[in-house]
Image (tube, rainbow, N blue to C red):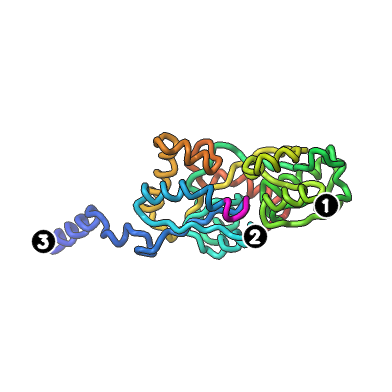
Amino acid sequence: MRRCLLTISIVLVATLLPAPAAVLAHPHGAEPIIIGIAPQQEPEKVRAMWQPFLRYLEQEVGHAFAFETASSIEEFQQRVLEGRYDIWWGNPLTYIQASKRLGYMAIARDTTRIAGLLVALKEGEVKSPKELAGKKIAYSAPDAIGGTLLVQSSLARVGVAPDQVETIYTGSHDAAYRAVLDGKAAAAGGVPRSFNALDSAQREKLVVLTRTEEVAPQPFAVHPRVYRSVVTKIQRALLKLNWAPEGKDILASIQYKEIVVSNDFDYDIHRDVARRLKIPY
């Protein structure tokens, strides 16, 4: 009986004692947490935009972070689906694919919902979406939810199906806009975030022909290999930006309005879009 009670006591103590420090650490030990940010703009511009955010995150979480982006959206999405990033921010369609295949979980997002934009030259020949039949449209990537799929869906509703235009993929929203500015495409798909980040001289030469319906924005998503204690610190740091003294400027630098807690259910609408467009995930 004594032996039984002793065994029970040991189990209870082991349960109540804090876990060893090694268990609470990032699985890479002293190695940095790799954070990937989708290249909606040119990679160097993305890196510059997110540096204040990165420095803040390191300070709040108490761990080094390694910032990464990619030369194109397609390359970035491939890296996500390979599980390269411990935490990443990007396309919701990529998220539902990565969630199903690798277990990535959304933990935070902006309050501003995303919409697609269809833009053309302000002084160009195209004045309405219906006039794009038979013309060339530039998109960043085939499965970009805002800048491609929502725009294509909007065009189809006005009678311009995807097979009625010539489509080119440029690798980034900036490059898609530049294709219009350079006369290589009649129109381009994008999103408000990247359009507003354009140099004002470039933006003034473009006109928005269509703004699509809105859906849940890009999530911050974490890989299941990141320990829960670290995920909690990251999530708390993200939410703290809403009231921290430096938070307003940091949120502005990444074109965020306010960060809120997110979860997988926020992206069921994207699963519906994928099913309608017969996109595997």
Q: Quadrant of the C terminus?
A: bottom right
- Asked if 215 appears above or below 276 in the picture, the reply is above
Q: Position of residue 58 (x, y in %)?
A: 39, 51
Q: Which residue occupies the foreground of this view, 62 or 5?
A: 62
Neighbour tally class for label 1: few under 14, some 14-19, many 20 plus, Cα within 10 Å? some
- Of the image marks 3 and 1, the number of the one nearer the N terminus: 3
- Of the image marks 2 and 1, the number of the one nearer the N terminus: 2
Look at the image and say whether residue 179 sits in the magenta stretch: no
Most common secondary structure along the magenta stretch: helix
Magenta residues, start to end: 41-45
Neighbour tally class for label 2: few under 14, some 14-19, many 20 plus, Cα within 10 Å? many
Q: Residue 2: give its label.
A: 3
Tell me the residue at 76%/52% (across/down).
179
Neighbour tally class for label 3: few under 14, some 14-19, many 20 plus, Cα within 10 Å? few
Q: Residue 74: give its label.
A: 2
| Residue 236 found in image quarter | top left
Tell me the residue at 88%/50% (across/down).
134
The secondary element bearing badge 1 is classed as: strand
Q: Residue 136: give its label.
A: 1
**Quick check: 72 left or right of 242?**
right
- Residue type (three-letter) at the residue carrying disc 3: Arg
- Of the image marks 3 and 2, the number of the one nearer the N terminus: 3
Tell me the residue at 66%/54% (across/down).
172
For the residues labelled 3 and 1, the Cα–Cα distance comes to 82 Å
